[in-house]
Image (spheres, grey):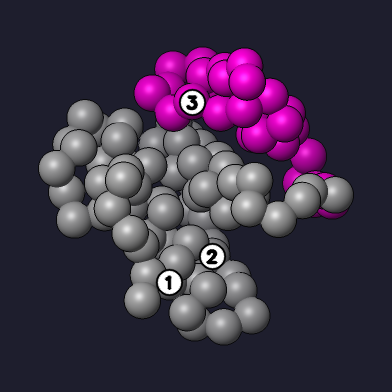
Amino acid sequence: MTTLTPPSSKVTLAPWQLRFYEDDARVQVVCWARQLGKDFTTAAKAVLDAMQTGKAWYIVSLTQRQADQTFAKCRVVVHFESGNFSGPDSPGRRMGP
């Protein structure tokens, strides 16, 4: 599988993730299979955009648990971008209950 890296980022994404990441439309509708990184890609998009532009992003989910899991993925991206791979939410560690 080919992987690509968004400009000025340490995050590596698959081609379908990168297409979503690079789309700057205000509203995006996607047809995406389960377990292919939608939540992580969205978290990376939010964190990297906020780091570059200073804009605030809001995490809205059907349940608090889902929002918490997305926020945990945002923390993973922040740790990864900052080079801190030993944090509590570092990649490879289980997130959520």
| Element under disc 3 | loop
Q: Earlier in the sequence, mark 2 or mark 1?
A: 2
Q: Where is residue 43 shown, x and y percent of the image?
A: 51, 49
Horizontal arrangement in the rendering, residue 15 relative to residue 77 (left or right): right
28, 13: nearer the viewer: 13
Q: How many numbered circles are shown?
A: 3
Q: Earlier in the sequence, mark 2 or mark 3?
A: 3
For the C terminus, the image quarter is bottom left
Q: What amino acid is labelled 1 in the image?
A: Asp
Horizontal arrangement in the rendering, residue 46 relative to residue 20 (left or right): left
Q: Earlier in the sequence, mark 1 or mark 3?
A: 3
Gap in Å between the C-alphas at discs 1 and 3?
23 Å
Q: Where is residue 80 shown, x and y percent of the image?
A: 30, 35
Q: Is residue 28 magenta?
A: yes
- What numbered label is drawn on residue 89? none
- What numbered label is drawn on residue 68? 1
Label 3, on which residue?
12
Gap in Å between the C-alphas at discs 2 and 3?
22 Å
